[in-house]
Amino acid sequence: MAAKRISQSAVNWAALAERVPEHQKQLFAAFKTKSDGYLRRVQGLPEAPPKIDWAFYKSKVPVAGMVAEFEKQYSALSIPYPPDTVSSQIDAQADSIKSDIEKFKISVMHILKKQWIHLTNQRSGLIILKNNWVMYLMNLRQRSINL
């Protein structure tokens, strides 16, 4: 079947599901169901068009040259795979978003450093800041692993 054409889904559904907001989970599930349906339909189709027994039709069709003409047209039939016109745009957008995320991380680090300096100078609230700092670093590490 079409297993040679599409060996696996190019979408990491589990990673995508983690990023979907709660209020959009139903829409995401419907989208995934529709996508899986399309994938099953494509995988159910043969990779190449079916073979036709032209000799059988030549013996049955009385019009001379008609089957030969159909055979010629059928063998010349080529259905091109549609060109990928949006992957480069998606990759550029992903790079831009990663750049924005890095800028945000740097900004948060600057804010935390300034808070650290401010609170260490005050000597009060140091334990709270330490706990916030540790929680932030743990979350940052976990998110970096998921990216």
Image (cartoon, helix red, strand yellow):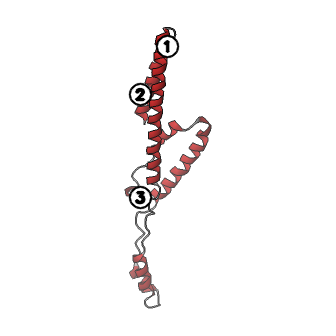
In the rendered structure, which disc, 3 or 2, sits on the residue that comes first in sequence?
3
Instruction: Give the answer, above or below, for where 65 lies relative to 127.
Output: below
Q: Which mark is residue 119?
A: 1
- What SS does tag 3 mark? helix
Q: Evaluate whether residue 9 shows in this view.
A: no
Q: Position of residue 127 (x, y in %)?
A: 48, 11
Q: Tell me the mark number nearer the camera, choosing from 3 and 2.
A: 2
In the rendered structure, which disc, 1 or 3, sits on the residue that comes first in sequence?
3
Q: Residue at label 3?
A: 2
Amino acid, disc 1: Leu
Query: Residue sitting at 59 percent across and 39 percent down?
Result: 25
Q: Tell me the mark number nearer the camera, choosing from 1 and 2.
A: 1
Question: Badge 1 local density, few (<14 within 10 Å), some, or many (20+)?
Answer: some
Query: Residue sitting at 47 percent across and 55 percent down?
Result: 86
- What SS does tag 1 mark? helix
Amino acid, disc 2: Arg
How far apart, in angstroms, are the residues tagged by discs 1 and 3? 63 Å
How far apart, in angstroms, are the residues tagged by discs 1 and 2? 24 Å
Q: Evaluate whether residue 80 shows in this view.
A: yes
Question: Badge 3 local density, few (<14 within 10 Å), some, or many (20+)?
Answer: some
Q: In which quarter of the image is the C terminus?
A: top left
Between 146 and 52, the one nearer to me in the picture: 146
Q: Position of residue 83 (x, y in %)?
A: 44, 62
Amino acid, disc 3: Ala
Q: Residue at label 2?
A: 141
